[in-house]
Amino acid sequence: MNFLAHAYLSFDRPKVLLGNFIGDFVRGNLEEQFEPEIALGVHLHREIDHYTDTHPVVKEAQEMLKPIYKRYSLVITDVYFDYFLSKYWNEYDDRSVQDFSQQVYSIIEKNEEKLPKSFLQLFHHMKKGNWLVAYGTLDGMKSTLTGISKLTSFDSKMGSAHLFLQQHEQTLKGYFDRFFPDLITFSKDKLEELSNDYDSL
């Protein structure tokens, strides 16, 4: 659900961004379904998710949430990290988050015919609500987390997770500040590695 981070970690390669966005919406042989740069982006998305899920700082943050949110702590930390990335965007990019988000929406709209319908249904809501910017506000967090909670089978308590964020913002930002530079380095290296693999095919 952390779309802003996946967009940022595509490092201004439009087709990679497309794949990075649809990583949770596709199955099967990627190379048969998509052109190389999009397939590469899907692989990068999955590598980013695995790295995030297994990073010790992320696990530490999740332990803070587990007494209340149980197994949904993993999803919530992902969403929280987009909050910090959006809110403190100018620490990571010279463009405004508003300008960057509009660039992302434009890239997706120009390539809609290449993307899964299930993703496009979500994307139209994303653009209408300007999610990538809204992530950086507590109201945006409330809306996002409440929306996710409606998809869960059990009482996730995610509808109140924005209040936990508000109460523990500085502590949670500390986790983000420790983790995100590692993720940037990993993602750049992994993108280069995957690109070399595709170039050799």
Image (cartoon, rainbow, N blue to C red):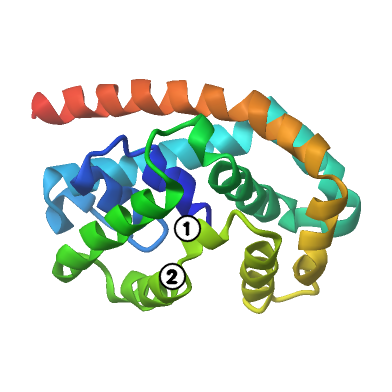
Image quarter hosting the C terminus: top left
- Point 62% across, 65% down: residue: 140
Relative to 3, is 79 on the left or the right?
Answer: right
Image label count: 2
- Point 48% across, 73% down: residue: 129
Q: Position of residue 2 (x, y in %)?
A: 52, 52
The amino acid type of the residue labelled 1 equals Leu
The residue lying toward the viewer, choosing from 54 and 133, is 133
Mark 1 residue element: helix
Query: Which residue in the structure is indicated by mark 2?
Result: 126
- Point 80% across, 74% down: residue: 155
Mark 2 residue element: helix
Query: Which residue in the structure is indicated by mark 1?
Result: 132
Q: Position of residue 20 (x, y in %)?
A: 34, 48
Above or below: residue 64 compared with residue 131: above
Return the mark for residue 75.
none
- Residue 21, quarter of the rendered image: bottom left
Q: Position of residue 200 (x, y in %)?
A: 9, 24
Residue 111 visible in the current orientation? no
Relative to 19, is 159 on the left or the right?
Answer: right
Q: Position of residue 39 (x, y in %)?
A: 22, 47
Residue 5 visible in the current orientation? yes
Above or below: residue 17 compared with residue 57: below
How many other residues sit within 10 Å of disc 1, few (<14), some (14-19) or many (≥20)?
many
The amino acid type of the residue labelled 2 equals Met
- Point 41% across, 74% down: residue: 122
Q: Which of pointers 2 and 1 lies earlier in the amino acid sequence? A: 2
Relative to 18, is 125 on the left or the right?
Answer: right
